Image (cartoon, grey):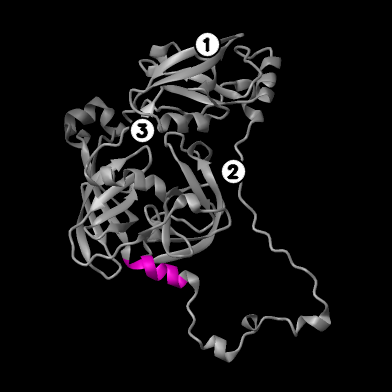
Amino acid sequence: MLAAMRFQNPFASFTAKIGVVLCASLLCLLALPIPLALASPILPLALVPTSAAANSGATSFVAQAVNQVGAAVVRIDTERTVTRQIPDPFLQDPFFRNFFGDEFSRPRQEMLRGQGSGFIVDSSGIILTNAHVVDGADRVTVTLKDGRTFDGKVTGVDEVTDLGVVTIKGDKLPTVTLGDSDQVQVGDWAIAVGNPLGLDNTVTLGIISTLKRSSAQVGIPDKRLDFIQTDAAINPGNSGGPLVNAQGEVIGINTAIRADAMGIGFAIPINKAKEIKDKLARGEKVAHPYLGVQMTTLTPELARQNNADPNSAFAVPEVNGVIVVRVLPNTPAATAGMRRGDVITQIDGQPVTKAEQLQDIVEHSQLGQTLRVEVIRGAQKKLLQVKTGELQNAA
């Protein structure tokens, strides 16, 4: 796979000195001392449990939010047939091969089953989910909360953003309300709805831990996403289900779990899905521009550490920018003359200081667009004209 940009550390000499830090926001509650004589008189009545309050039947905001989306959250069951060639050391012996023939060495087919979640965004039967939930499936079965089941058709997948669209044919299908993920703030409530571990209609509650967590930081550099990070529990089977705000609007699509994380999950911002869901529903391919380099962020401190090491491969300028680790062959960057060790500092006059920033600029460019890329090569500045190409494969 010719990934457009994979974030790698080019300097073996100081890779041990660089760590990826996943920042989680801290929700703090400030308690102020209240004089004992004043504590009882000013205590809000709402905080005092009474039989009337207990029996009022008031519904929590979580229940209200879930009631708005719950009927439109679906379980997606998939079946996929794979062919495996399983070598048997026993049959490598010529004697046994002559005796048994090739009967046991033939490819064998195996049925793989998977399960995930999704949600209906249009009453015509359009369902949003993750690409990895349905990609390559031979059969898709969609089950609604009310028990109805439908044969689903995968109309489109985009591996780069891990988004997929499944369509079903039905009457009076419930739908969700899509929110605005650009308005989400750290500390907002986050409600994950889905079918984790085969347990249908499961709801978990947490907060938005941080925003714009890059796919490279999450550990999947072949994607092009800035995730919403949440501490709402997301487990296998939650993939493709909605992340909902306190108003019952979908703000994200649950997608990623880190095996080494404690209570951290990630969701695709719903605004990203809005950009491409209609194309996927029509069966169209989503184009992603790329340059064809592997890169990493460079800072003056990292550059000084590299330059002070007598075993480093080459010296680099002590500036903020993005250093090219590798130029992939037969790519736009290679055609434009970009080289390993070039430090990219500007694109079309816009300063570039982080690899994620460069990737975002390229992602939002047009296919075939010529980008003016300013690089520092050794002690010289050079201006390269790079015409973007189309990323063919995200794997």
Amino acid at the residue labelled 3: Ala
The C terminus is located in which quarter?
top left
User: Which secondary structure is most common in the magenta stretch?
Assistant: helix
Amino acid at the residue labelled 2: Leu
Instruction: Verify whether residue 70 appears in magenta.
Output: yes
User: Which residue is pictured at 64% across the width and 58% down the height?
Assistant: 27
Q: N-terminal of the two: label 2 or label 3?
A: 2
**Residue 394, which numbered label?**
3
Q: Secondary structure at mark 1?
A: strand
Q: Secondary structure at mark 2?
A: loop
Instruction: Verify whether residue 324 appears in magenta.
Output: no
Q: Position of residue 269 (x, y in %)?
A: 44, 48
Could one spot residue 118 in this view of the protein? yes
**Residue 22, which numbered label?**
2
Amino acid at the residue labelled 1: Lys
Q: Secondary structure at mark 3?
A: loop
* Distance of label 3 from label 1 (alpha carbons): 30 Å
